[in-house]
Image (cartoon, grey):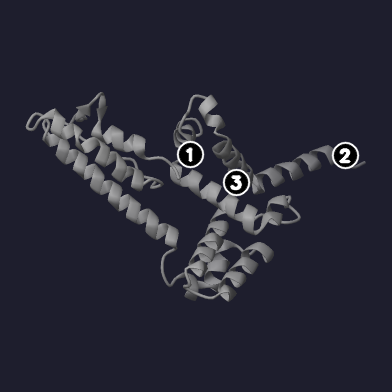
């Protein structure tokens, strides 16, 4: 007589559902916390610090999760109701591609027919990302997604600020602390403008002994000030 595995079968279906919709569940939870500011009550005034220190998620990953979820919730909310088995949920990478395509369409790079075709491939046909890219490669590959261009620009700017921090370290003891202190607000403002880049300022080393060193102004180094100003958008 065949063994009744109804309960085991149902559990496997539930686990499959959770696996296939896991990014959506995480993105939804992150979006709720980001809006409610509950992370402050947990000892993290800054949302980015909470994600990085407690969840071990980089700002770049969190931004992608939240942005992809918000895009779906406004443009294709019905997708969020899928069970992940009978109706598959697009991967976060596929939603990113769709979101970038919509952004580029809004900038006038191509017509709405391209956006509709990409959306059909991802939302309705549930094609794998590789197939979607191959099908639309002539359009998609014309230039990097706007998001990538912006991210690379922010990373380059932050690296420049990091080098400025190194140069200022070398001036410690050469010029007055008051002069160095005057750079802190400007440096923080510049890094604030680069927020969202998934890049931490590199540690500065003392060339003589290789140990980390910093210019401390009011108890904080310039590089610390730059790092603290870097929060997720």
The answer to which of marks 1 and 2 sits earlier in the sequence is 2
Which badge, 1 or 3, is on the more N-terminal residue? 3
Q: Residue at x 15, y 30 (%)?
A: 178
Can you say whether 144 is above or below 176 in the image?
below
Residue 187 in picture, x, y percent from top left:
26, 41
Q: Quadrant of residue 2?
A: top right
Residue 60 x/y as whole percent: 45, 46
Q: From the viewer's perspective, is 214 left or right of 81?
A: left
Along the line of sight, which residue is nearer the eye, 128 or 116?
Answer: 116
Q: Which residue is mark 1?
A: 57
Q: Secondary structure at mark 2?
A: loop
Q: Are marks 1 and 2 in contact (CB under 8 Å)?
A: no
Per the image, the residue denoted by label 2 is 3
Residue lying farthest left? 174
In the drawing, what numbered circle is on residue 23?
Answer: 3
How much space separates mark 1 and mark 2, taking CA atoms? 43 Å
Task: Say if mark 1 contacts mark 3, CB within 8 Å.
Answer: no
| SS category of the residue bearing label 1 | loop
| Rendered location of residue 88, percent (x, y) | 69, 56
């Amino acid at each position: 007589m065949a063994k009744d595995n109804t309960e085991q079968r149902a559990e496997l279906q539930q686990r499959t559902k959770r696996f296939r919709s896991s990014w959506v569940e995480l993105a939804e939870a992150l979006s709720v916390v980001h809006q409610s500011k509950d992370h402050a009550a947990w000892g993290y005034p800054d949302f980015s610090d909470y994600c990085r220190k407690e969840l071990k998620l980089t700002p770049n990953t969190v931004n992608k999760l939240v942005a992809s979820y918000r895009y779906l919730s406004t443009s294709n909310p019905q997708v969020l109701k899928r069970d992940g088995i009978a109706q598959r949920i697009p991967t976060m990478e596929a939603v990113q591609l769709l979101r970038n395509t919509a952004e580029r369409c809004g900038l006038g790079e191509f017509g709405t027919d391209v956006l509709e075709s990409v959306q059909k491939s991802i939302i309705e046909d549930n094609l794998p990302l590789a197939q979607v890219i191959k099908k639309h490669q002539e359009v998609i590959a014309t230039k990097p997604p706007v998001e990538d261009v912006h991210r690379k620009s922010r990373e380059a700017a932050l690296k420049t600020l990091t080098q400025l921090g190194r140069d200022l370290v070398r001036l410690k003891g050469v010029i007055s602390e008051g002069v160095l202190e005057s750079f802190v607000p400007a440096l923080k403002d510049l890094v604030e403008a680069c927020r969202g880049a998934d890049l931490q300022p590199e540690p500065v080393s003392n060339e003589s002994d290789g140990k980390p060193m910093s210019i401390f102004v009011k108890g904080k180094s310039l590089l610390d000030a730059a790092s603290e100003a870097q929060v997720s958008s």
